[in-house]
Image: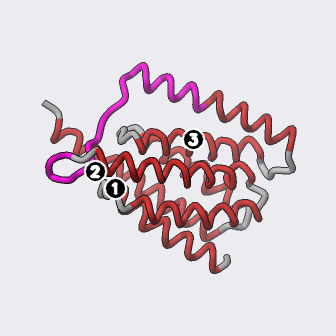
Amino acid sequence: MSNIEIIAVLLGIANIVLIIRRSVWNYPFGIAMVSLYFVIFREAKLYSDAGLQIFFVIVNAYGWWSWSRNKAQAGEVVVERLTPNGYAAWIALSILATLTWGFVMNQHSDASYPFWDAGVAMLSVIGQILMTRRLIENWYWWIAVNIISIPLYVLKGLYLTAGLYALFLALAIAGLLEWRKVLSRHLP
């Protein structure tokens, strides 16, 4: 455990709480957190996770812009839902992306647990895209990411980060429940 990991964890908690509340202010906390996690994961040889943090900076900047422009009259961010075909397509893409990236990392790097790490990275990319688009299904991806991340980070000795992801798992479930309530209030 390092000071940088402690700060990243605190920023992560603030980020997820603000996402659950559908606050656009989640994004500055997210950008700061992922910037720190780039360093943490690079040092742990979790290269897919490290690279993921670069993606997160970019998509958080986009999300900040997008959420700022997609608010209801009351100022809340509007929540939407995937179609069944869209849901199936995102699942298929998740599997294909994980296997492809895992193979690349396995063949061309000294990454620890390349397929496991690729799963965390690819599911996170898709979860982030769905969240940026304000789709309720993003929470299913984050639940899966958290479930597979916790044991990986324990194996790598990133105990505080594993604890953060356990908290993220609880918050992802809470986020799903909250966004379901919001969505049900806005259905005709």
Residue beneath the point at 65% across and 41% down: 119
The residue wearing badge 2 is 178
Q: Position of residue 20 (x, y in %)?
A: 34, 56
Q: Residue at x 48, y 52 (%)?
A: 60
First to last magenta residue range: 72-94
Q: Amino acid at mark 3?
A: Leu
97 left or right of 130 in image: right
User: Which residue occupies 36% across, 24% down?
Assistant: 83
Q: Residue at 80% x, 52% y: name it.
A: 112
Say which amino acid is labelled 2.
Glu
Q: Secondary structure at mark 2?
A: helix
Front residue of 27/98: it is 27
Left or right side of 158 for 86: left
Indicate the quadrant containing the C terminus: top left, top right, bottom left or bottom right: top left
Residue, disc 1: 20
Q: Camera-side residue: 48 or 181?
A: 48
Secondary structure, mark 3, is helix
Give the residue pinned by disc 3.
123
The reply to whether callout 2 and callout 1 are in contact (CB within 8 Å) is yes
Answer left or right for 110 relative to 11: right
Identified by mark 1, the residue type is Ile
Residue 56 on image: x %, y %: 56, 52
How crowded pointer 1 is (Cα within 10 Å; few <14, some 14-19, many 20+) is rated as: some
Q: In the displayed structure, would residue 36 be above or below residue 106?
A: below
Q: Is residue 179 in the magenta section?
A: no
Image x and y of residue 65, in percent: 39, 50
Q: Earlier in the sequence, mark 2 or mark 3?
A: 3
Whichever of callouts 1 and 3 sits on the residue coming sooner in the sequence is: 1
- State the separation of the CA atoms marked 2 and 3: 21 Å
